[in-house]
Image (tube, grey):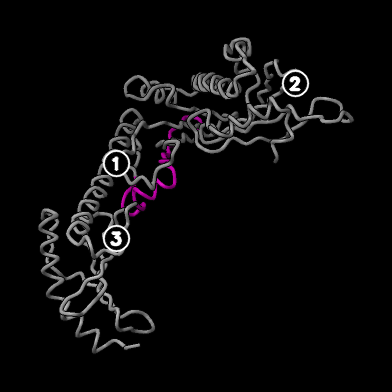
């Protein structure tokens, strides 16, 4: 959809909404649908001035119709709330009463204000559900989680599920920058209560894809299971602490990989060909021993120093099956508790010893061009 269809003053407001793309806790882009003009169809330059916003909320979405006046830029927008027509009186929205058409983010400010009122409206609906109300009250009163940190979503059906989307307030400092977004990342916990009494509780950790990749596969790490006799005021802090420890481990491993590689790069300053600055996962060197030149490649596992690096020797003279003759070695002296300097010294000793073996294997088993 082209935004050029909109009246200029509406376009300015929408561009700011799209730029920031978030008015609540729930991630995901805000969709702009059904643009329409309010004037007569035969009028030239009849710009669109009304549209529907689909805003992510509580693991679902809410639909709000926004109505401007193309001919009156100074007038504030009107709203029609499809999901909950009476959740707030527009006369109570101070940001709407203080509408300033000259500010490009005026609509965005109003949307954030409306979202706060919608959060409170949904939380108030929990009064019909004693178990879920108890979980909400104890979570916001007995832990660091505040009411502003939770998006509650109650479906209209009595038996329908109820969602809590909880902002965990965990920082991702220390992990490789390549995994971070410029606008910041948020860890969320989506908790679904199934059934009228909310006795079956299903938690799901929601992370940005890059952060999820940085923390490792579900086989290596996952959030703790929710106990059938547990409660959220105990479980949510447990998840927060578990996530913090995982982030600290990833940051520690990254720091140690950087330390390891830079020790090698400093020692072999004139010999390195390339190295992975983003993830500190690999480096490649050109070495020579007794007139024999070879490529030496280091691969560092994500869990280094617990995980042992692999060394690959690659010939520049011989090939095997149309590829450079190479050998990957894991059997060499290594102790995860060694200082990085000791690891370097032990590796140098190993390279000097194994280079001769590799040279002989390359000559005997490789093919010359």
Q: Is residue 318 above or below residue 338?
A: below
Q: Mark 1 = which residue? A: 174
Left/right placement of residue 84 relative to residue 67 reads left
Q: Is 347 on the left-hand or right-hand side of 180? A: left
Whether 143 is drawn above or below 58: the answer is: above
Q: Earlier in the sequence, mark 3 or mark 2?
A: 2
Q: Earlier in the sequence, mark 1 or mark 2?
A: 2
Name the spot of residue 207 as percent of width and height, x first: 42, 42
Q: Which residue is mark 3?
A: 282
Disc 1, SS: loop
Say if the magenta span includes residue 214. Answer: yes
Identified at 77% across, 31% down, the residue is 36
Q: Secondary structure at mark 3?
A: strand
Distance between mark 1 and mark 2 Cα atoms: 48 Å
Task: Tell me what residue is drawn at x 63 percent, y 23 percent.
Answer: 84
Magenta residue span = 195-222
């Amino acid at each position: 959809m082209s935004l050029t269809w909109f009246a200029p003053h509406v376009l300015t407001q929408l561009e700011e909404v799209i730029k920031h793309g978030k008015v609540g806790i729930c991630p995901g882009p805000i969709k702009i649908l059904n643009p329409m003009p309010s004037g007569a169809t035969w009028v030239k330059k009849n710009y669109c001035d009304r549209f529907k916003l689909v805003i992510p909320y509580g693991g679902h979405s809410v639909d709000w119709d926004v109505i401007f006046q193309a001919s009156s830029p100074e007038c504030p927008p009107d709203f029609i709330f499809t999901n909950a027509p009476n959740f707030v009186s527009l006369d109570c929205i101070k940001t709407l009463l203080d509408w300033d058409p000259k500010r490009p983010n005026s609509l965005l400010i109003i949307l954030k204000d409306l979202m706060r009122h919608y959060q409170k409206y949904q939380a108030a609906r929990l009064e019909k559900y004693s178990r879920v109300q108890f979980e909400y009250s104890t979570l916001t009163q007995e832990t660091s989680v505040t009411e502003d940190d939770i998006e509650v979503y109650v479906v209209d059906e009595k038996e329908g599920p109820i969602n809590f989307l909880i902002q965990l307030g965990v920082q991702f400092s220390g992990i490789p920058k390549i995994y971070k977004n410029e606008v910041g990342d948020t860890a969320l916990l989506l908790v679904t209560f199934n059934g009228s009494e909310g006795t079956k509780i299903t938690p799901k950790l929601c992370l940005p894809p890059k952060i999820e990749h940085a923390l490792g596969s579900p086989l290596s790490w996952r959030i703790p299971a929710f106990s059938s006799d547990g409660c959220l005021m105990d479980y949510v802090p447990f998840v927060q602490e578990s996530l913090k420890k995982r982030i600290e481990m990833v940051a520690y491993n990254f720091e140690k990989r950087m330390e390891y590689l830079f020790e090698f790069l400093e020692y072999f300053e004139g010999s390195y060909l390339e190295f992975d600055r983003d993830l500190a996962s690999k480096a490649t060197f050109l070495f020579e021993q007794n007139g024999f030149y070879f490529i030496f490649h280091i691969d560092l596992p994500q869990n280094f120093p617990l995980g042992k690096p692999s060394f690959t020797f690659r010939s520049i003279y011989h090939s095997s099956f149309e590829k450079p003759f190479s050998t990957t070695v894991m059997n060499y002296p290594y102790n995860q508790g060694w200082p990085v300097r000791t690891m370097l010294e032990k590796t140098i000793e190993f390279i000097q010893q194994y280079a001769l073996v590799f040279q002989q294997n390359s000559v005997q088993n490789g093919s010359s061009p």
